[in-house]
Amino acid sequence: MKNTDSPDLTDLMHHLGACPFEFQMMPRMGETGEIDTAALCRDALRMVGHEPLSGAAEKQVHFTLPPNPDHLLAAQIGCWFFSHAWFRGRKNLIPKIVYFLSEVLESISEHVQPALWVRDMERREEFCRLALAACKLVPLGETKKQAAERFESVSTLKRNKVLSKTAAAYHRMKEIRRQMKEKAAREAANVYGRE
């Protein structure tokens, strides 16, 4: 059964692709006048909930953002993503959005350069699908199964696992061939030595 109260993936991808340059700038904390990632996250969540964050949610945003620059940049891009009109007024999503910004993006940020979330179409789709999955949402017109299958097809982590397995299999095959050549050389040397 398809969910009728779901966001349009194409619209979300277009919105993400229009992420302003300022959201993609390296964050600087303190009195520099530059973007403070935690403050940006609180502002984005305030827009989603149409009201200031509760004390607990505000503390969670502040303390769960580590000083990893790639994660901070990805979180800033996530703030832009959740500024989309579809998310406004959906206060129930705030804990899931916090989870996405703090934990999901932290785990994936070491595998994807932040700029690719905006520039590369496949990474942009992956970002949108990651965010929707973290929020327990299915894109408009898709079933849960379809959404899961499509996510698998664009997942960086899944692709990295496949590449690792392929590389490991290649190295095993190369080692077996090396051992076979050595064995053949030893056998040839034995035959030559007996003559």
Image (cartoon, grey):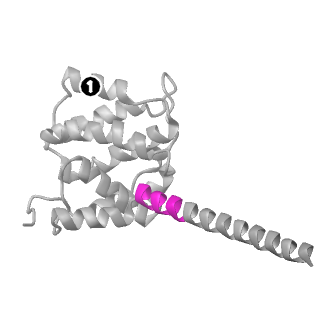
Residue lying at 42% horizontally and 47% vertically, measured from the top left: 108
Q: Is residue 61 above or below residue 145?
A: above
Which residue occupies the extreme front position in the image? 194
**Is the residue 50 above or below the residue 189 in the image?**
above
Q: Position of residue 43 (x, y in %)?
A: 29, 34
Indicate yes or no whether the magenta region holds residue 126.
no
Q: Which residues are magenta?
A: 156-166
Q: Residue at x 17, y 65 (%)?
A: 140
From what the image shows, is residue 127 above or below residue 90? below
Answer left or right for 137 relative to 149. Answer: left
Residue furthest out toward the bottom: 195
Q: Nearer the viewer, residue 72 or 85?
A: 72
Nearer the observer, 10 or 175:
175
Give the left or right position of residue 22, taking residue 147 as reference: right
Count of marks placed on residues: 1
Find numbered disc 1 in the image and state the secondary structure of the residue it sits on. Answer: helix
The relative height of residue 22 versus residue 188 in the rendered view (above or below) is above
Q: Position of residue 122 (x, y in %)?
A: 41, 65
Q: Which quadrant of the figure has residue 178? A: bottom right
Q: Which is more toward the observer, 16 or 65?
A: 65
**Residue indicated by mark 1:** 58
For the C terminus, the quadrant is bottom right
**Residue nearer the viewer, 36 or 140:** 140
Q: Main secondary structure of the magenta part?
A: helix
Residue 62 in picture, x, y percent from top left? 35, 25
Residue 53 percent across, percent down from the top left = 20, 28
Indicate the amino acid at tag 1: Glu
Q: Quadrant of residue 93?
A: top left
Quadrant occupied by the N terminus? bottom left
Q: Residues within 10 Å of mark 1 (few under 14, many from 20)?
A: some
Q: Residue at x 31, y 62 (%)?
A: 151
